[in-house]
Image (cartoon, rainbow, N blue to C red):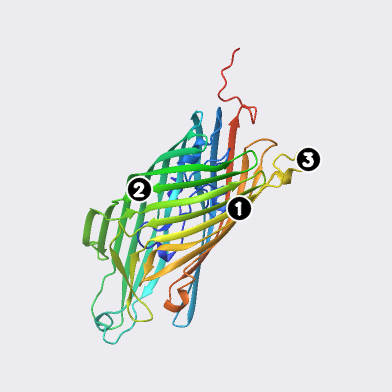
Amino acid sequence: MAQSGSINAFSPYTMYGVGEVNTPGTLIQRSMGGVGVASRQAGTINLLNPAGLSMVSRKSFLLNFGGEGQNYYNYQTLDGVNKKSAHNSFNIRDIAILIPLHKGLGFSVSVTPYSSVGYQMLYDHAFDVNDPVWGNVGRVNYQYQGEGDITEVKFGVGYQVMKNLSIGVAAQYYWGDIDRGFVMVPVSITGGGTFNSITGQSEYAVSRFKAQVGVQWNAILTDQRILTFGATYDFGGDLSPKVTETISGDDIYSTAVKDDTYHMALALPRKLVVGAYYQTARWAVGLDYDYQNWTSGNQTSEMTGIHAPTGTAFRVAYCDTHTVKAGVEFTPARYDVRRFWRRWSYRLGARYGSFHQSYDGHELAEAAVTAGIGIPFKFLGMSAVDLGVEYGMRGFNVNKNVGLVRQDYFKFAVSFRLFASGTENNEYWFMRPKYD
């Protein structure tokens, strides 16, 4: 319930489809720009590639959970007037557990937000002396708003086939509700006639299973360094959300103009991610390429109905996305007994790509820089607290020349990794006592 308890996004670009797709992965991975499809690290849960779950310690249990705060800032310049808005939120970000089933065989369950919807907008029907609305009714005010989330529950299994090769498979269950509505309020200036307001509401209910497969291969595996290549493929497919749509007039009877229930043609993309991850005792460096095929299952487009400076409405359509992610982690001395801060891990990352919807053929560029630290709880232990921050931008490439919104945001997150093992924390979870 906490995943959908408040608005987790605040952007006009969430008006259509599933809204804003959240960056996947644990806070460690998000603090490194979102890389990790090839990551293999003990004491962590790889939410990006189920093959990484095979890197699990025997007789252990790992719990990962955290929260994230978001600050959105939207800017737009129309007719020489600068407009801006802001919104802040905080919510649970992810919950995940990892347990060993056998040597080289790990199983995980995770709950993470897949996408978020949140917007509030006002629009006044532009004056046009030849417009019959203005000629017969007068000014008309439109109010648009929406909120909701889609959550991903993921069941993953990773198996180490041989020393340098691991494979994995995951079942993904998507569920959630998105509510979108509008209110049309006419303000008569002609002095004659009575006009009612119109209220519309659309409720999307999502409940679908999808699948993912992954592979990891160690090209180099020594005591000093590890080089791993990894890849995942998400099958995507039709979400087919159940839509309940109502439009009613604001009279004493609340007369229904439209009342329909149907399944919407909305699909998740087929997704291919490939990457490399290099590790030493002090350094970890990762690079990922993410391709998402949104156009194959989403062929329809919509018109915004809001006139651009050119006098034409914007056509909103899906487009495929290409994203490059890079990140680095530095740990000065993992086994330093005297200086606690030298056992901390310091992370930096960046990514660049595009949004999955275009506006009049203009694709929105997206970019972000990230940073974070990992603080271990005790010497030689794997439990830790992770802190991360992200600054991102969207629409900066087109906001000035076509009047679209530029969006800046900050995200602050905290996550806890709780690792229990007889060899690390002296917690004998899986040991059978010989004496009672």
Position of the C terminus, as image quadrant, is top right
Instruction: Say which label, 3 or 1, has the lower sequence index.
Output: 1
N-term-proximal mark, 3 vs 2: 2
User: Toward the viewer: 213 or 204?
Assistant: 213
Image point (34%, 68%), residue name: 316
Q: What amino acid type is highlighted by mark number 3?
A: Arg
Q: Please, is residue 222 above or below residue 311 in the view? A: above
Residue 246 got which mark?
Answer: none
Could you tell me if residue 275 is visible in this image?
yes
Q: In x, y percent, where is residue 172? A: 39, 43
Q: Which residue is mark 1?
A: 328
Give the quarter of the image for residue 181: bottom left
Query: Residue 331, position in %: x, y?
Result: 67, 47
Mark found first going from the N terminus, 1 or 2: 2
> Local crowd at mark 1 within 10 Å, few (<14), some, or many (≥20)?
many
Q: Is residue 88 above or below residue 170?
A: below
How many angstroms separate mark 3 from mark 2 (CA)?
A: 49 Å
In this view, 161 is above or below 339: above
Element type where label 3 sits in the image: loop
Q: Which residue is mark 3?
A: 338
Q: Are marks 3 and 1 in contact (CB under 8 Å)?
A: no
Dots 3, 2 in contact, CB < 8 A: no
Tell me the distance, in whole angstroms, between the alpha carbons under discs 1 and 2: 29 Å
Callout 1 amino acid = Val
Name the front one of labels 3 and 2: 2
In the image, residue 47 lies at what x, y percent? 48, 44
